[in-house]
Structure formats: structure tokens, C-alpha cells
Image (tube, helix red, strand yellow):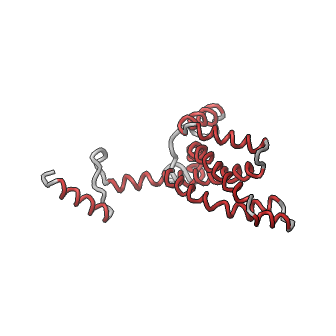
Amino acid sequence: LDQPLGLRYWHWVSGLVMGDMGDSYAYSSPVLDLVLERLALTVPLALMAMTITTALALIAGVYAASRHNKLGDVGVMSLAQIGIAIPNFWFAILLILLFSVKLQWFSAGGFPGWTQEAGGGPLEAIKALLLPAIALAVVQAAILARITRSAVLEVLREDFVRTARAKGLSQRAALWGHVLRNAMIPVIPVMGLQFANL
């Protein structure tokens, strides 16, 4: 702290470029080690949440679009609106109450570790991350389902879809083979932003 502010900032930025984030005053250890330690849980949790988000959103969005202005569409979009409105932390508490306290299928907290030496294993680790991943995925899936529905509805109105249906392609084959592929163009950037957020 005996150096000028600009010089200290320069040393910090040059160290950051080289991978040296300095030492944590709170933990008295290198910051990079602390970040890497947290990433061992954060990255798998984000991947699990994004996988659940993608599966739920694509199925719900395509289902709602294929039943446009019918009961299925209204029901799925109502659930999506509720999913957007529910805070993640509150939904996580409800999941813990149901699956950990009442049914006792999952542990209410803690992480057993990825290895047998740490006291867990891959299956126990995935099981411990499942409820948090679902809690994170609900809001993300609701948002993505609405975007998927809009994109699928837009592509369904295209001429090539009418042509494919006129040539005898079933609605399911047209939806999953042609429509969804083209509807993913606006959906994929949103998925990228959601993964970065997770």
C-alpha cells in the first residue's frame, strides 16, 4: 500500500492477465484457488440446470405452438407465466420441503463430493445437485419455452412447412424435423445468455 494507486492497479491488471488474481484478505489464500474450488460445483450445476431447461423448454414450447390457441397452449403458457413469476429461492425451499423433508428422497443440504475418497461419488454428487438444478431451471425453462413457442409459431407460417405437409409429411415429423431446426435460430442466443447467467 506504499505505492501510488495507479501503479498498484497496473500490477493487479498485469497479474490478472497472467492468472494471478492476488490473495484473498478474508481467506488468506490465492483468489484463483478459491475461484477454481467453487467452479468444481458451479459448472456442473449450471450444465445440469441448462440441460433441464433446454429439455423442458423445447418440449413445452413445441407442444404449445402445435396446439396454438387451444387448451394445451393456454395451459402450458399459464404454467410458463407462473414459472417466470416464482422466485428461484422460494421454489428451492418448496422442493426441499417436499423432496427432502416429507419424502426424504434427497438430502436437505451439503455436497458429498465427486470421489469416493471425499465421501461421495459421481452418482451421489449428481443427486445432491439435482434439486438445486431444478430450482434454477424452472424460471429459465419458462422464459425459454415462451421464446420457443413464438419462434415455432413464426416458422409454422412459412411456405416450406405448408409444402412439406402437402407432400405428406406428418405434423410431428414437420415440427421436429423442419420447424424446430429453423426456430432454433432465435432460441440459441437466448440459451447462451441463460447459460452465462447460470
**Quadrant assignment, res 79:** top right
Q: Furthest residue to the right?
A: 168
- Tell me if residue 74 comes above or below residue 157 in the rendering: above
Residue at 49% in and 54% down? 196
Residue 155 place in picture, x, y as percent:
71, 59
**Camera-side residue: 107 or 53?**
53
Q: How many marks?
A: 0
Residue at 63% in and 45% down? 142
Q: In the displayed structure, does residue 139 sit left or right of residue 76?
A: left
Residue at 55% in and 34% down? 90
Q: In the displayed structure, does residue 195 sit left or right of residue 147?
A: left
**Camera-side residue: 68 or 110?**
68
Residue at 54% in and 52% down? 194
Residue 62 place in picture, x, y as percent:
72, 53
Q: Furthest residue to the left?
A: 2
Residue 44 seen by the camera: no
- Tell me if residue 121 comes above or below residue 101 in the rendering: below
**Quadrant assignment, res 84:** top right
Residue 107 place in picture, x, y as percent:
57, 39
Residue 153 seen by the camera: yes
Residue 45 place in picture, x, y as percent:
53, 51
